[in-house]
Amino acid sequence: MIDKSDKHAYLLMAHNNLDQLNFLIQNLDSEFNDIFLHIDAKSSIKKEEIVKPIFSHLYFCDPINVYWAEYSQVQCELSLLRLATRTGRYHYYHLISGMDFPLKSQREIHALLADRNDLFIHFTTPENVDATLSFVKYYHLFQKQLSIVNRDHTFSIYKVFNKALLLVQKIFHINRIPFNLTIKKGANWFSIPDDFARYVIDMQPVIERQFANTRSPDEFFMQTLAFNNVGFKKRIYRFYEDDSPKSCLRYIDWQRGTPYVFTVNDFDELVCCDMFFARKFDYRKDKFILLKLANFIGNTM
């Protein structure tokens, strides 16, 4: 393992839109970064189609099938973290998707984080946690099948099985959550320092035991780990639990979409928001916003 403590590791989760993914990699390419890429095993994107960075090292994570709201999301994130931490000791690890884009130059991001060791993790409100606590409290054994059904908008017997299973667990008062564990929740995108990244990897058996066969575990496990460790809890940036994406340095608009897809008309809003990254974008819908942002970032170096 090489000491890369002055560098950052970008952990990319991608599944489609090759041109946009390559454009993102080109704009992350820097002597300050290495890039770790997971391409969904279901994707038509081929490894040899990925652009080769000039300055960054690009590492490919072994592909797995990733399903929405299923434990494979967590497995993917852990695989990326494991690969990066085995490669070197990076100052920060940023999880982003192929639909994200930086709002600041890499030089500026590094300068702003140079002397920081905060955990930039999103936390939703306690009310939202309570409303979705059943996602973790009960066993959700058919989440993979339900993910496929919901994507294709078709009927499935698994919907019936799932409702019956949840009803039985409620009747018998099943509760998977240990009495000494406080569950927290938020968006899965993060920027975390090296020591917490390694703590997460070390906690994989605990993560699997608590969050396998749950619903949307990627929105619970990182927040829960950070909150329940006294040392790391003190270092959570902006721990207000107000659902603001500012806590994870991402500009995401859930008011206009799920989330909203930014266009060139949103340029001024994006460059004035003072976040590090934004999501999401769609190269096929409006590539000019990405070209304009890339030009803006380039001019601020």
Image (cartoon, helix red, strand yellow):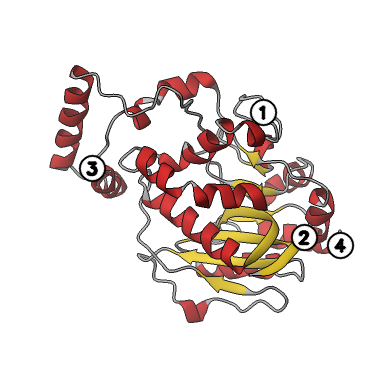
Q: Name the residue under label 1.
A: 239
Which numbered disc flags the more N-terminal residue, 3 or 4? 3
Q: Name the residue under label 4.
A: 301
Q: Is residue 43 left or right of residue 175?
A: right
Rendered image: mark on residue 54? none
Pointer 2 local density, CA inside 10 Å: few below 14, some 14–19, many at least 20? many
Question: Would you say the residues marked 4 and 2 are in contact, meaning their CB atoms lie under 8 Å apart?
Answer: yes
Per the model, the C-alpha gap separating discs 4 and 2 is: 8 Å
Amino acid type, label 4:
Met
Pointer 1 local density, CA inside 10 Å: few below 14, some 14–19, many at least 20? some
Q: Name the residue under label 3.
A: 142
Which numbered disc flags the more N-terminal residue, 4 or 1? 1
Amino acid type, label 3:
Phe
Per the model, the C-alpha gap separating discs 1 and 2 is: 25 Å
Residue 197 coordinates in the image, percent (x, y): 60, 51
Instruction: Say whether residue 20 is visible.
Output: no
